[in-house]
Image (spheres, grey):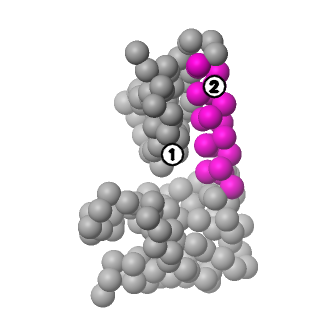
Amino acid sequence: MEVQDRVREFMRNTLAAMGLPLEVTVVDTPENIRIELSGEGGEELLRRKGEALDALQQIVNSGFRRELDDDRSFVVDCLEYRKAKDAELKQMARYYIEKAKTSGMPQEMGPLNPYSRRLVHLTVAEDPLMSSESIGDAFLKTVIISVRK
């Protein structure tokens, strides 16, 4: 059984145990493997800024990411909540990139979870003049965006 099939089954069982009979679709993309959840009751996962959605994503990546042949990870989304949040985060990163360029001062974003930090680092990496680093020693860290020296 493929890892995607096992993840789909795991998600179905987990959501059923939570009392959320959501539709689970696995979409393989070049950047990541998206697990898209839809259906009635999906809003339950989006309460408190999507904490339950983040927790599910963390669990899936902890349990299944090592089985992938590449460096992709799993992204768990429900009712396109994460897609919208990701676009918002990338837009914010671009804002801080411009602010760092014009002011010459490093800009801080955070605290951010590992998934959000990765998105910010990838967005910063699109600009060869800029660099980013994570600081902190907890699960949530701050990303410093600065002009490359």
Kindly identify the amino acid type of the residue bearing the numbered disc 1.
Leu
Kindly identify the amino acid type of the residue bearing the numbered disc 2.
Glu
The residue at the far top in this view is 104
Which residue is under mark 1? 119
Nearer to us in this view, 102 or 78: 102
Looking at the picture, does residue 120 appear above or below residue 68? Answer: above
Question: What SS does tag 2 mark?
Answer: helix
Of callouts 1 and 2, the N-terminal one: 2
Range of residues picked out in magenta: 84-101
Kindly report the secondary structure that dominates the magenta region of the rendered protein. Answer: helix
Determine if the magenta segment contains residue 86.
yes
Measured in 3D between alpha carbons, the distance from the residue under mark 1 to the one under mark 2, in whole angstroms, is 17 Å
Label 1 Cα crowd, 10 Å radius (few <14 / some 14-19 / many 20+): some
Residue 68 x %, y %: 30, 68
Which residue is under mark 2? 98
Do labels 1 and 2 touch, CB within 8 Å?
A: no
Residue drawn at x 67%, y 65% is 80
Nearer to us in this view, 105 or 76: 105
Residue 44 showing in the rendered view:
no
Q: Quadrant of residue 67?
A: bottom left
The quadrant in which the N terminus is found is bottom left
